[in-house]
Amino acid sequence: MSDTSSRRSPLAGWLLTAAASLALIAPVMAQDLAADGLKVWKERGGCFNCHGDFGQGGEGGHFPAGPSLRASQLDPDSMREIIACGIPGTPMPYNLKGAYTEAECYGEKGAVLEGAVPGASLEPTELDALMAYLGEKVVGKRRITKAE
């Protein structure tokens, strides 16, 4: 009778170690992605120009004039599409590089919709980072902390 468990144990042990390592690394990777997203917010996206330094938004007509992202009720997919594709006919620009022409927006691909305003021309990875930042530090976070 052969014991196959002893032959599998090094592989099983390695898999268990790898899984445990990923569990420890994943939060750090998410923090790094959110930190990269903060850079996009501040340096590339220009988001603070309308939504305020902390995503708090404003009443309109003055800085910041955009809606509060902290109080947003949008699900992440809808928010991502709005950031990527903008809202035609409003000041909200499309920010994804190739939006409408290379990437589908609101079910359309080919030509930029009338009334759509160009924005930051973010790479998809930058948009991912921005979404990580918003999800971790802004959306649903009503209080602004001293650290922010």
Image (cartoon, helix red, strand yellow):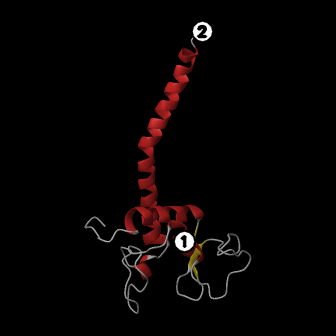
> Which residue is pictured at 41% across the width and 69% down the height?
139
Nearer the observer, 50 or 108: 108
| Residue 53 sits in quarter | bottom left
Q: Which amino acid does label 1 sit on?
A: Ser
Nearer the observer, 107 or 130: 107
Mark 1: few, some, or many residues within 10 Å (few <14, many ≥20)? few
Q: Residue furthest right?
A: 110
| Residue 71 sits in quarter | bottom left
Nearer the observer, 15 or 116: 15
Estimate the x, y position of residue 9 in percent, counting from the top left.
Answer: 52, 20
Estimate the x, y position of residue 54 in percent, counting from the top left.
Answer: 36, 73
Tag 1 residue: 78
Above or below residue 92? Residue 25 is: above
| Disc ID at residue 2 | 2
Identify the element where label 1 is drawn.
Answer: helix
Identify the element where label 2 is drawn.
Answer: loop
Report the Cα–Cα distance between label 2 and label 1: 56 Å
> Which residue is pictured at 40% across the width and 90% down the height?
60
> Which residue is pictured at 54% across the width and 88% down the height?
90
Q: What residue type is labelled 2?
A: Ser
Q: Which residue lies furthest to the bottom in this view?
A: 61
Q: In which quarter of the image is the C terminus?
A: bottom left
